Image (spheres, rainbow, N blue to C red):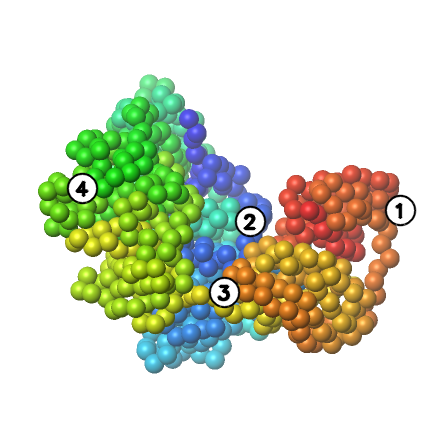
Amino acid sequence: MKKIFFYLFTILTTNLIAQPTNYYESCLGLSGDALRAELHNIINDHQSFSYTTTKTILREADEDYNNPANILLVYTGNSIDKFDFASNFEPDFWNREHVWPKSHGDFDAGDPFEVPAYSDAHNLKPVDHSMNTLRGEKDFDMGGNIALNGNIETECYTTTNTFEPRDEVKGDIARIILYMDLRYEGGIGEPNLVAVDGLTTYPNPQIGSLSTLLQWHEQDPPDAFEKRRNDVIFKWQGNRNPFIDYPQFVEYIFSEDPQNNPIDITNVTLNPEDLEGGQTFTITANVLSSINCPTQSVTLNYGNSWWDTTNNITMIANNNGEYECEIPGQPYNTMFCYSITATICDEVTQTFFGSEVIPPYPFEGIITPIADIQGGVEFSPYEGQSVNTTGIVTGAFANSFYLQDGAEPWSGIYIYSGSALPEIGDSIIVSGEISEFCWDGSPCDCASCGGAGVTEIYQPEDIYIISNNNPLPEPILVTSGEALSEQYEGVLIKMNNVECVSEANGFGVWGVNDGSGMCGIHNTPDGYEHDYQIGEVYNITGIVTSTFDEWKVDLRMASDVESGPDTTPPYIINHECYQVGGSYYIYLFFNEEINTDYVNMPNNFLVIGGDIQTINMDTFDPTKVIISMDNVTSNSFIVNVFEMLDISENSAENIFYQFNCDFDLSVKEIDHSFKIFPNPNEGDFLIEIYEQESEILIFDVQGKLVLDAQLKAGLHKINIQNSGFYYVKINDHFSSLIVK
């Protein structure tokens, strides 16, 4: 079985947190500069994402656990809809706060080597627009006047130079700042950030006040919300905030004379090694002390999550001098989380953390496809029978959810649980009896009650979650007139260009029509309630169902209702100019997502003011086009796009856009001591070094190093696995390379 072991060396008891295998193992026994260096190495190489993607990360990381449809705003504690985001700071919407301001370190997304600090989710928090503006680039410190969110008083305080957050997040803010100090130490394309004890001025890569931040760290230790956030960001980026996992790391790094822990917990063993659900097992461990002080106690805490390790067992020394205890059988398909804490004289403690995956029970039943359960008819041929079926959860509500195993008619089913529910995107196996749910609100024989019945599994016997975050089946495109039919019962559908033609009835159902027939749209109180307007046109996604003798489409989330149709042709709304040595880059931003084929079309772009080298669509932003240029003779440019289509096939011809850049035209193109060919290529290319041995560095568009090699003079073959836009650095010289 896969085991997860990691150590915590501390002189105080600690909160528990899940971490990957041996994540901090190399830090055992370290403190001061040595510990800092090792922690930096552990968290340094993280996966960077586009700034756009960080919205998705924050929607998960800062989710309001009391209302999963909402997100918690850091400075006010307000809980608002996850999808009420506005980059232009609209009231009652949220935006992203750089806790370490990007101006304190100049890590704005300013060149093709996008600085990881700019989009590091550990440093980003959702915030009210006015609080984002009010905090600005201020240092963190105590005191000042009450901060106003619009006209509403908050629990924050501010001066002209400082900002004090509310008590509940003071520690959160401190640990973010300390993380940024630790993570960014001036690597390639990265700032060297330093938390200092005093007020700072930007653009210096510093922020204060360190002594206040350390005080906040002590006063407000990590809570379950902060720990879960750390886990979510780790899932995305692949790195953690060590000061959340082990708060005492702050003392070990920042104290003047840190002391190593004298206790060592070794040879932790589970017997039997391969666990099964419900199986009793034994844990043993050796406890050694480097000082002459007897062991006072060894205890083990355990549970099936790191938030609830409340079961406590005293470990007893056996005849071999080991400490051991017996653990009762654990549930199938869970994580067994545990900690061993040894205490010696003067209440000095050491804690060992570990976890064990308890495998799911082997499923031996027969899986019945949902289409067979539906039977292609109004009433299921399996009514009254127990079945096992599997699929992806497409919608989840207060006490029920929908399951779908394909993207065809008859592929969905409604499940009433009334208990703990899976989440959208979960792949599950569900077992239970098939019934028909009728308009009178109870399971019944719909053949006799005359209502429109919904085939369902009522109060399933078992729900087995196979995996999470799976892609959903593609919604079936239908007209409003054909949507409400038995074949789409429980199925995810989409209707384009439907007009709102009637207000909601007493059950929250409002009507739309695309000319083919009326369709009811259900504002679900535990799903999504749209503020519709008569006469507006929408694109609507949802799940077809029937209750109270009425067919309708259940709304799940805000993104289920889009404004439509799109009749606006594409056009350029903004630009950005960047320079790397003698290479020049122009970013063009369109008003909407554009057709990639027209970006790749030869000679479709003309730039007056320089020669086009390459044109590429941004990997993460489909509204953004990147143009690399040379032979730039002026800072005044005119772009002519001869033809462009958006994804709705709206066409525009001869798009003209005039703008200015602030390029340093005194920079001369460097005569390279190397040659790269062919360019573009299909993955394999050659580098010819003309002179002495040189270091070759290759970066992707996010600034992540993908190759670091020493090449001697001569011809060398290089392979790049993934397609895209790459940069090659040889010594101090930059050149662009397209790899397709």
Circle number at residue 691? 1
Farthest-out residue, front: 516
The quadrant in which the N terminus is found is: top left
Residue 500 horizontal side relative to residue 42, left or right: left
Q: Nearer the viewer, mark 2 or mark 3?
A: 2
Are discs 3 and 1 less than 8 Å apart at CB?
A: no
Residue 606 horizontal side relative to residue 368, left or right: right
Amino acid type indicated by mark 3: His
Nearer-N-terminus badge (3/1) = 3
**Secondary structure of residue under mark 3:** strand
Nearer-N-terminus badge (4/1) = 4
Nearer-N-terminus badge (1/2) = 2
Gap between marks 2 and 3 measured at Cα: 18 Å
Q: Residues within 10 Å of mark 1 (few under 14, many from 20)?
A: few
Picture layout, residue 732 above or below residue 642: above
Residue 739 visible in the shown view: yes
Which residue is under mark 3? 98
Are discs 1 and 2 less than 8 Å apart at CB?
A: no
Give the residue drawn at x 45%, y 56%: 56
Estimate the x, y position of residue 501 in percent, counting from the top left.
30, 68
